[in-house]
Image (tube, coloured by chain):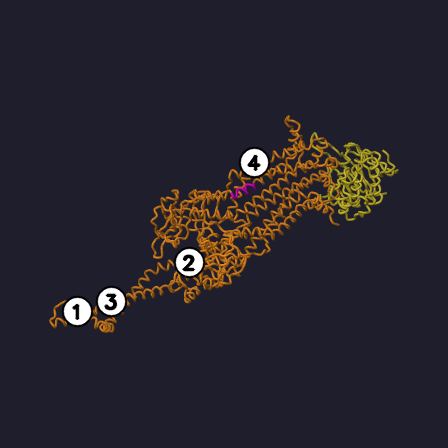
């Protein structure tokens, strides 16, 4: 039995003040094991992106804590948080946020530069099927290709945790499946813990661990024993 | 692994090359010109200072009325005072001896004649002769026969010997008495009792010259006066800008500046006196960097005065009077100005006494440190460039600011990327470094190219400017540390800190806020409600409101441009205005400064001119507050102040009633320059002495012509310990013709004041015009960059409006019109602000210079300074319109997030 790698404890977060105050996370508890593919499911406003941002160290909780490998994020200084993101995290967003005047390979190198143990850029390019596009600029790529680059940028760091915020939100069905397959591959091949935020119910079937959120609390926290591959998913 | 973000920089440079090209050109021009000025300045000074050594510049010179004997030269060289008392006694005794001898001879002759006559009369009486005619005949015959023998006998007599000894002794006693009587006065006059006197041994060089009429175009009319020296002089030698030294009797080398001004070229023939010469060299004498004919001339005259070199044979053949001028060099060089003054004082005493003791006369004396011809240009060059470098820093500050704004816009545009990078672990410092690199690289590039040009093309520009004014030697570029610091380090630091400040502020936001595009620190609660205007009008107003920060920068830029315009137009206007006002600035049509209030005989110098009025004057210094910025730049000299002692009920200057107890009135130029108010106490000090004077300001006199202090003549004499009948010169409404020219040190007339402004305009005129047009180009570049920021920032909405079906003309009216309105409105406001600022800046600038004149702009210049900006903007608008037309529609589609 694997030990807990990521632990979320009594996490609370609200925005605004007075009458406009909105509680986004209202005491959230769960843990994720190392190497797990974990999906955070929930409708809009359920607090899943906020939760992901807190895990990613780019937002802070009002109460409770997130601990990674026993280290509590809220005890870290800003500098330590930057180092935490630099050394342990990979981020994939719904929008690709690539640097327009760097080509595909260079955009991936932007991630590799940050890591002490980066993967080989060419190997990542091959894994992502981007070898033939490596000298193209982002505006010469389709949305799916751009998202592959954005995954490459995150994966090349060989991160302990890969945080994915609606990575297929802007993609069509077919491309979405390809992207999910790539994330699945990275999880298997490089052993990264994947935490993916999505509102797509179908994706839960390819994960090890499904956490359903609603109104800022965990409604379900299930382990999926019958994982499907990304290409087997239908929605 | 190298940070891959570095690769963005060359691509960014390539993709937006026109913007960076404008910026780099802007920087290259600014830095190049300033670097050129410093390099030119340092190279020129190096050449001048080097020349002082290699060309053996004198420490001073004097001219005698006739050639000095070897003994006199030896005695002057010793630096010792002559024993004037012995000289006077010796001279007095000689004169007395002659007088006594003559008196004795006369008396003796008389007595001998009388004795012969008595003898003849006695003999005639013995013979009974009584006819007086016969007796007189006998007497005459006896005198002619025996006078000489009798005289000889009488001379040999003991009685005569005793009498003459007595007479000589008495006469000598009288001489000694008279010398003693007058000695105190003489000693005081020449400062002979000075206990601090230390002999200053010198080496003396013969440096004779002749002054000949120069006919530059051989038309028979005199064009200038040429002061001619021999080519074999070993003191105060010349360097050759072109050509060579004369080698034959028909060859001549003349001053380059003079040749330039009157149009003489190598190979031309000119006439000096009655002799024709071929010009074989254009030279610069080390002691004539400016062509001051007399040291008392307010301004040099490179048209009417020339210095020339001919062979010794040709020199002998010139017909005019020989000037017995001698140059000297001290045995040990004085270390500073005070020591130079002390050396000069002591040497002068030795010179005066020795010349007197050798019965020669001093026609002229001038220590080198007071010589305008060799110091005027140097101090002018030393004082240059401070103003230009300040302007350079302001411009680089503006560019830095434009950069910072551009980067700030880029950061806004790249918010998501920055958020992602920050979320991925890029530290804020890494991003700051990344965004800082572009301005620093561009500045370095600009500085490198600018400095390279500074050492080549622009150096010649600066040197050319100096050559245009002064008779300077040829110079080689020297490495200038000042140029490096001021044109590379300071711009880099300016760029670094301005950008650092803005970028750090901008990147202070959390990664999440970048990801969410929450870039404003405070969110507006709700959108502003607009009046019920037409849709396009409201749209335009929205654009204006949304781009407020950019418009604020534009406004700032417009104000700055107007400031520069005020400078470019105002500087020549101020000079012209000063020249125009000069006649009304004079408090007397003629102001005669005398060499001394007494003539050689000790009588006061008087004039029959009715309008003449005596005044006293002294030159003192007012200590300026010096900033460390200015240290080492030039002389950093204190302000020279003329202190006038004015007669009671003067017809020329009306003092207030409050002139007791050291109270003074100051000129309005003095009051305005240093912001001195009545009631304040000011301290003035003498330049070469350790004496200072404190005065309380009682009021001010409306006089813009100079930095001056006025007090009543009695107070003046008491403060400066002058005799009651002492004075320095005359004010007069009409020309004074009955004072010997040699007694007049200087005459200040309106023409003299105008000569100064004319020379300034002549020396600076070309540069000011170049500067004016350079500023107009820089203005266009600046407004181009500022307008570009607004269009760049709105690329997406412009693209979107195109998608929606707006025509290019409509879009231009939406995005260009607000800018046009802002530019037009603020060109006027900017002018007012710029004009006011320029008055302040000009005042600060004048504080660094000697003298004072206020900033002035003529109404046409005011109009033009606004018009040029608007014309510049009209061109930029045209470019903007093209820019808007070229924005593709997919900009809006591709980047939507």
Q: Check disc 2: other Cα within 10 Å, few if <14, some if 14-19, many if 20+.
A: few
Q: Which residue carries the number 1 mark? A: B137
List the residue tagged with mark 3.
Answer: B106
Q: Which chain is depicted yellow?
A: A
Please report the bounds of the magenta region as a residue range.
B563-572
Q: In this view, does A151 lie to the left or right of B758?
A: right
Q: Which of B230 and B626 is in front in this view?
A: B230
Tag 1–tag 3 contact (CB < 8 Å): no
Q: Which chain carries label 2?
A: B
Q: Does the magenta stretch include residue A131?
A: no
Sequence-wise, the earlier of marks 1 and 3 is 3
Q: Chain B is drawn in which colour?
A: orange
Disc 4 secondary structure class: helix
The percent coordinates of residue B384 (x first, y second) are 54, 50
| Labels 1, 3: front one | 1
CA distance for labels 2 and 4: 59 Å
Pointers 3 and 2 in contact (C-beta within 8 Å) = no
Label 2 belongs to which residue?
Answer: B364
Q: Earlier in the sequence, mark 2 or mark 1?
A: 1
Decide which of B184, B885 is in the foreground and name it.
B885
């Amino acid at each position: 039995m694997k030990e807990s790698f990521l632990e979320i404890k009594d996490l609370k977060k609200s925005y605004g003040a007075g009458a406009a105050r909105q509680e986004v996370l209202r005491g959230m508890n769960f843990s994720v094991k190392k190497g797990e593919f974990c999906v955070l499911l929930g409708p809009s406003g359920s607090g899943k992106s906020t939760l992901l941002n807190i895990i990613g160290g780019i937002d802070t909780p009002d109460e409770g804590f997130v601990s990674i490998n026993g280290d509590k994020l809220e005890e870290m200084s800003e500098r330590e948080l930057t180092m935490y993101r630099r050394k342990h995290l990979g981020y994939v967003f719904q929008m690709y946020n690539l640097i327009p005047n760097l080509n595909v390979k260079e955009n991936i190198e932007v991630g590799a530069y940050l890591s002490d143990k980066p993967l080989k850029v060419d190997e990542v390019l091959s894994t992502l099927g981007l070898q033939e596009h490596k000298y193209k600029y982002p505006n010469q790529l389709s949305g799916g290709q751009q998202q592959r680059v954005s995954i490459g940028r995150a994966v090349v760091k060989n991160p302990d945790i890969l945080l994915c915020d609606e990575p297929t939100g802007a993609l069509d069905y077919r491309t979405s499946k390809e992207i999910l397959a790539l994330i699945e591959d990275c999880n298997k091949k490089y052993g990264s813990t994947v935490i993916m935020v999505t509102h797509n119910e179908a994706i839960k079937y390819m994960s090890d661990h499904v956490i359903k959120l609603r109104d800022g609390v965990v409604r379900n926290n299930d382990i999926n024993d019958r994982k499907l591959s990304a290409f087997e998913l239908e929605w | 692994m190298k940070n891959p973000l570095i690769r963005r920089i060359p691509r960014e440079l390539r993709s937006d090359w026109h913007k960076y090209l404008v910026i780099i050109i802007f920087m290259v021009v600014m830095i190049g010109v300033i670097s050129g000025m410093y390099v030119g300045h340092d190279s020129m000074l190096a050449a001048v200072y080097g020349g002082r050594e290699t060309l053996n510049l004198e420490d001073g010179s004097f001219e005698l009325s006739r050639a000095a004997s070897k003994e006199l030269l030896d005695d002057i060289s010793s630096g010792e005072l002559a024993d004037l008392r012995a000289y006077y006694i010796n001279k007095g005794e000689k004169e007395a001896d002659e007088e006594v001898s003559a008196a004795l001879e006369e008396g003796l002759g008389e007595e001998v004649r009388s004795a012969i006559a008595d003898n003849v009369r006695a003999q005639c009486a013995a013979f009974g002769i009584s006819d007086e005619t016969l007796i007189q005949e006998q007497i005459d015959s006896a005198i002619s026969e025996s006078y000489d023998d009798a005289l000889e006998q009488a001379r040999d007599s003991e009685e005569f010997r005793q009498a003459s000894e007595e007479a000589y002794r008495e006469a000598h006693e009288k001489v000694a008495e008279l010398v003693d009587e007058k000695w105190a006065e003489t000693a005081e006059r020449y400062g002979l009792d000075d206990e601090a006197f230390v002999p200053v041994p010198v080496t003396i060089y013969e440096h004779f010259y002749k002054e000949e009429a120069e006919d530059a175009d051989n038309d028979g009319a005199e064009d200038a006066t040429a002061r001619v020296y021999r080519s074999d002089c070993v003191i105060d030698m010349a360097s050759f800008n072109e050509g060579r030294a004369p080698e034959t009797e028909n060859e001549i080398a003349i001053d380059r500046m003079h040749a330039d001004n009157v149009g003489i070229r190598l190979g031309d023939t000119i006439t000096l006196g009655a002799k024709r010469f071929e010009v074989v060299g254009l030279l610069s004498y080390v002691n004539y960097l400016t062509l001051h004919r007399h040291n008392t001339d307010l301004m040099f005259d490179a048209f009417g005065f020339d210095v020339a070199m001919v062979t010794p044979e040709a020199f002998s053949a010139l017909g005019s009077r020989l000037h017995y001028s001698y140059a000297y060099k001290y045995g040990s060089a004085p270390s500073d100005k005070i020591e130079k003054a002390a050396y000069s004082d002591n040497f002068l005493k030795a010179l005066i006494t020795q010349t007197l003791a050798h019965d020669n006369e001093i026609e002229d004396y001038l220590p080198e440190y007071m010589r305008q011809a060799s110091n005027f240009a140097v101090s002018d060059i030393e004082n240059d460039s401070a103003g230009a470098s300040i302007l350079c820093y302001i411009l680089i500050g503006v560019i830095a600011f434009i950069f910072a704004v551009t980067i700030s816009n880029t950061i806004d545009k790249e918010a998501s990327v920055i958020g992602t990078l920050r979320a991925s672990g890029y530290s804020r410092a890494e991003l700051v470094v990344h965004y800082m690199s572009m301005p620093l690289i561009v500045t370095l590039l600009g500085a490198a190219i600018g400095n390279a040009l500074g050492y080549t093309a622009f150096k010649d520009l600066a040197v050319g400017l100096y050559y245009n004014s002064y008779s300077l030697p040829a110079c080689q570029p020297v490495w200038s540390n000042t140029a490096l610091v001021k044109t590379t380090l300071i711009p880099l630091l300016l760029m670094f800190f301005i950008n650092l400040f803005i970028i750090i502020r901008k990147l202070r936001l959390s990664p999440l806020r970048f990801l969410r595009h929450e870039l404003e620190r405070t969110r507006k609660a709700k959108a502003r409600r607009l009046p019920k205007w037409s849709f396009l009008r409201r749209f335009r107003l929205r654009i204006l409101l949304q781009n407020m920060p950019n418009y604020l920068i534009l406004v700032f830029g417009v104000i700055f441009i107007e400031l520069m315009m005020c400078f470019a137009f105002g500087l020549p206007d101020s000079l012209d205005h000063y020249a125009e006002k000069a006649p009304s600035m004079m408090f007397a049509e003629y102001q005669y400064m005398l060499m001394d209030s007494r003539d050689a005989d000790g009588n006061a110098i008087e004039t029959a001119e009715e309008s003449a009025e005596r005044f006293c004057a002294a030159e003192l210094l007012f200590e300026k507050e010096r900033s460390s910025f200015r240290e080492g730049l030039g002389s950093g000299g204190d302000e020279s102040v003329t202190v006038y002692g004015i007669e009671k009920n003067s017809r020329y200057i009306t003092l207030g009633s409050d002139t007791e107890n050291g109270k003074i009135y100051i000129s309005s130029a003095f009051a305005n320059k240093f912001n001195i108010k009545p009631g304040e106490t000011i301290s003035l000090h003498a330049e070469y002495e350790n004496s200072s004077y404190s005065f309380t300001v009682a009021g001010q006199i409306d006089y813009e012509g100079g930095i001056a202090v006025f007090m009543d003549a009695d107070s003046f004499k008491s403060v400066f310990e002058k005799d009651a009948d002492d004075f320095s010169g005359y004010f007069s409404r009409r020309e004074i013709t009955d004072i010997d020219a040699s007694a007049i040190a200087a005459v200040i007339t309106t023409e003299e004041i105008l000569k100064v402004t004319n020379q300034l305009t002549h020396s600076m005129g070309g540069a000011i015009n170049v500067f004016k047009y350079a500023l107009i180009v820089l203005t266009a570049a600046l407004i181009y960059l500022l307008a570009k920021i607004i269009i760049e920032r709105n690329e997406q909405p412009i693209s979107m409006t195109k998608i929606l079906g707006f025509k290019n003309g409509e879009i231009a009216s939406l995005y260009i019109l607000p800018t046009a309105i802002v530019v037009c409105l603020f060109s006027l406001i900017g002018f007012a602000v710029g004009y006011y600022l320029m008055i302040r800046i000009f005042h600060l600038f004048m504080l660094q210079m000697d003298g004072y004149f206020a900033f002035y702009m003529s109404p046409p210049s005011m109009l033009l300074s606004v018009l040029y900006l608007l014309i510049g903007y009209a061109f930029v608008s045209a470019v903007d319109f093209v820019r808007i037309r070229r924005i593709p529609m997919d900009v809006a589609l591709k980047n939507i997030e």
